[in-house]
Amino acid sequence: MNCSSLLSRLVLAIVCCLAAPSAQACSICVGDPNSPLTKGAVWGVTVLLGVVLSVLGGIAAFFIYTARRSSAIDQQKNLNSTVILTKKV
């Protein structure tokens, strides 16, 4: 891809963004805050945020569970090795 083709695509993208005033702001910023569209957008964002936080919480809980289990297994191994060493002496 040469420089003039890239420049022409960039200019076209800028013109398209500037030509559509409705694409410059969301319905919450420009529209009526009590409209059904705005309320739907707010609920959509809320639900997606809840899904993301649930997934991240599940991942964090898994790693906490894994760390605790690993610690418990290490303590059990240390206890067993202490018992074996005291029996041999």
Image: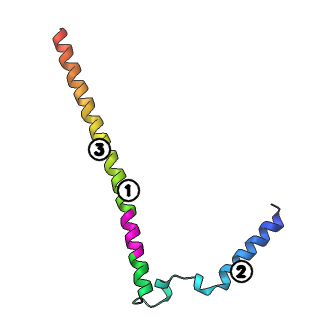
Left or right, residue 67 beside residue 36: left
- Picture quadrant of residue 57: bottom left
The 10 Å Cα crowd at callout 3, few under 14, some 14 to 19, many 20 or more, is few
Q: Secondary structure at mark 1?
A: helix
Which of the two residues, 14 or 34, is positioned nearer the viewer here?
34
User: In this figure, which residue is indicated by the disc labeled 2?
Assistant: 15
User: In this figure, which residue is indicated by the disc labeled 1?
Assistant: 56
Left or right, residue 45 beside residue 23: left
Q: Is residue 46 magenta?
A: yes
The amino acid type of the residue labelled 2 equals Val
The amino acid type of the residue labelled 1 equals Leu
Q: Is residue 30 above or below residue 41?
A: below
- Cβ atoms at labels 3 and 1 below 8 Å apart: no
Range of residues picked out in magenta: 44-51
Quarter placement of the N terminus: bottom right
Residue 3, how many percent across, how many down? 82, 64
User: In this figure, which residue is indicated by the disc labeled 3?
Assistant: 65
Q: Chief secondary structure of the magenta span?
A: helix
Q: Secondary structure at mark 2?
A: helix
Q: Is residue 11 magenta?
A: no
Identified at 70% across, 77% down, the residue is: 14
